[in-house]
Image (cartoon, rainbow, N blue to C red):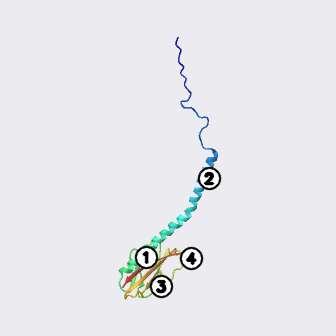
């Protein structure tokens, strides 16, 4: 007589371990604490990053304004040069800059954020209508005839108190 073979099949194809590998509550709490600490540190850096970004944009705008003033002064002729007050180059919308002597009281210009000259000023008072003040100083004592050192100090923001402003200085030599 032949004996029937018994085919034993387990209920599951893979054996089930007695201990399921998973994270314990303590491990989850520690991980959340580390993530929370990192997020707080990142959020704390946002104001610093925003201020740095604003300062960088102000410095870029100041550089563009200085380049524009230098370019207009270089293209002029004679001891009195002009800087146009608006970007449309309207007739009679310019200010005179004297290259014959250091005269800082007459060489202040106020600018808006887009680089438009708004007015001549005798000083740089705090004024919310303007974003930048440019003081154009001319020094003729370079030792070479008809050569002047032109320095442009651009201060921003114009509406801030004098201690809250930043000033960027730009210098070039200009013949006339």
Q: Is the residue marked by circle 3 packed among few (<14), some (14-19), or many (20+) residues within 10 Å?
A: some
Decide: marks 1, 4 in contact (CB < 8 A)? no
Q: Mark 3 points at which residue?
A: 104
Gap between marks 1 and 3, in whole Å? 16 Å
Relative to the observer, which residue lies in front, 158 or 85? Answer: 158
Percent coordinates x, y for residue 149 in the rendering: 42, 83
Give percent across and percent down for residue 120: 47, 81
Q: Which residue is label 4 attached to?
A: 163
Work out whether mark 4 precedes mark 3 in sequence or the reverse, and give the earlier one: 3
- Classify mark 4: residues with Cα within 10 Å, few (<14), some (14-19) or many (20+): few
Residues at discs 2 and 3 in contact (Cβ within 8 Å):
no
The residue pinned by badge 1 equals: 66
Q: Closer to the observer: label 2 or label 4?
A: 2
Q: Which of marks 1 and 4 is nearer the N terminus?
A: 1
Between residues 11 and 149, which one lies in front from this camera angle? 11
Label 4 SS:
helix
Indicate left or right for 5 with 85 as reference: right
* Residue 134 pos. (x, y %): 47, 78
> Residue 17 appears in which quarter of the rendering?
top right
Q: SS for tag 2? A: helix
Circles 4 and 3 in contact, beta carbons < 8 Å = no
Q: What element carries label 1?
A: helix
Of callouts 2 and 4, which one flags the residue occurring earlier in the amino acid sequence? Answer: 2
C-alpha gap between disc 2 and disc 4 = 41 Å
Q: Which of 37 and 58 is in front in this view?
A: 37
Compare marks 2 and 3 and give the one earlier in the sequence.
2
For marks 1 and 2, give the CA distance: 50 Å
Q: At 53% from the left edge and 18% from the top edge, which residue is drawn?
A: 5
Local SS, label 3: helix
The reply to whether the C-beta atoms of the residues labelled 2 and 4 are less than 8 Å apart is: no
- Residue 133's label in the rendered image is none
- Judging by the rendered image, the residue that carries numbered circle 2 is 33
């Amino acid at each position: 007589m032949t004996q029937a073979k018994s085919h034993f099949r387990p209920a599951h194809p893979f054996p089930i371990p007695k201990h399921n590998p998973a994270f314990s509550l303590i491990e989850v709490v520690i991980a959340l604490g580390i993530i929370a600490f990192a997020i707080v540190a990142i959020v704390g850096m946002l104001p610093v990053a925003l201020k740095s970004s604003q300062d960088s944009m102000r410095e870029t705008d100041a550089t563009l304004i200085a380049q524009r003033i230098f370019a207009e002064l270089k293209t002029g002729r004679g001891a009195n040069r002009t800087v146009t007050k608006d970007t449309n180059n309207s007739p009679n919308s310019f200010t005179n800059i004297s290259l014959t002597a250091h005269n800082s009281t007459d060489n202040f210009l106020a600018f808006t954020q887009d680089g438009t000259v708004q007015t001549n000023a005798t000083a740089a008072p705090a004024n919310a209508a303007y974003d930048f003040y440019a003081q154009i100083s001319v020094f003729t004592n370079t030792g070479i005839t008809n050569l002047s050192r032109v320095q442009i100090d651009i201060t921003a923001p114009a509406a801030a108190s004098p201690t809250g402003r930043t000033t960027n200085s730009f210098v070039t030599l200009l013949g006339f």
